[in-house]
Amino acid sequence: MTFPTVGIIASHQVRGIYEFEALKLGIKVNFISEKCSVEELIEFSQGCDLIYVDPKIISPASIKTVEKAGIKIYPSTNTLEQFQKISTSKNNGERLSILVARSAHLQVSTWSITLITDNLTITPAPGMNFEQSQDIQLSALKLADEIGLIGAVELLVDANDYKKLLDVNWLAPNSGYWSQIGSKTNFYEQNLRAVLDLPLGSTDINSQFILTGKLSSDPTSDDYRPYLHLMARNPELKFNQVSKEVGITGDNLEDLLTEVIHTQQYYSGEINE
């Protein structure tokens, strides 16, 4: 038995992440980030034990055709059809992000629930008691079971009514970065584990709070100067220059918010100190 190869079709922003996580797991990843025809999909699958695609890039119809050709592809047609039966709502305000993973052996996991604003994420979502959090997580696990999920997804729901589903992200979640700096097993590694039916890892968080913030470039400066200054000012900051995000972990939510907001303002040129 040899280590498997997974073919992934997803946003280019997550390519490096999946390649790195695959390397740690001892598996190989073949990656493309563009739409392709059914014929190209079938050709891409050659030499792969399975292919894992983002339905926002590869249409459900193409997935169904490839599946009928005997190729192991996720998400499955059945899973996508079950999702299509669920009505979605629109919301431009605050959202909750629920990350959930499920393997073929029916092992499941969720992460702490994340609050998403326009340019910040806070994990765990503030103001939510244990019972509320548990209720939301159990609902997510139930949904994963009902649709026959294999892999991991991000469910985005209305922060004021978690039963209102807003969107689903498969391989490139909006709130994935926090799990890289604040969880024992991040979303991307768990996604690979789940789709390969490997034992799932612990999703415990490593501090009381994890915050991330989107970064905007200063049009009058290159990004490197503020980047160096901010890293020197606070070595606890974690930057992702691919997704243009900053993150930090700790136990004092107010202090963490102050630090992330200052970083965003300085990086964008809004303030100069």
Image (cartoon, rainbow, N blue to C red):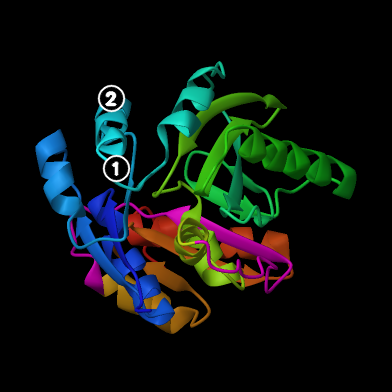
Seen at 37% across and 55% down, the residue is 215
Query: Dot 2 corresponds to which residue?
Result: 61
Mark 1 crowd level (few <14, some 14–19, many ≥20, 10 Å Cα): few
Would you say the residues marked 2 and 1 are in contact, meaning their CB atoms lie under 8 Å apart?
A: no
How many numbered marks, from 0 up? 2
The secondary element bearing badge 2 is classed as helix
Q: Nearer the viewer, residue 80 or 133?
A: 80
Query: Dot 1 corresponds to which residue?
Result: 70
Q: Amino acid at mark 2?
A: Ala
Residue 220 inside the magenta-drawn segment: yes
Seen at 46% across and 73% down, the residue is 238
Q: Nearer the viewer, residue 34 or 120?
A: 34
Q: Is residue 113 above or below residue 92?
A: below
Q: Is residue 176 above or below residue 89?
A: below
Magenta residues, start to end: 197-224
Q: Earlier in the sequence, mark 2 or mark 1?
A: 2
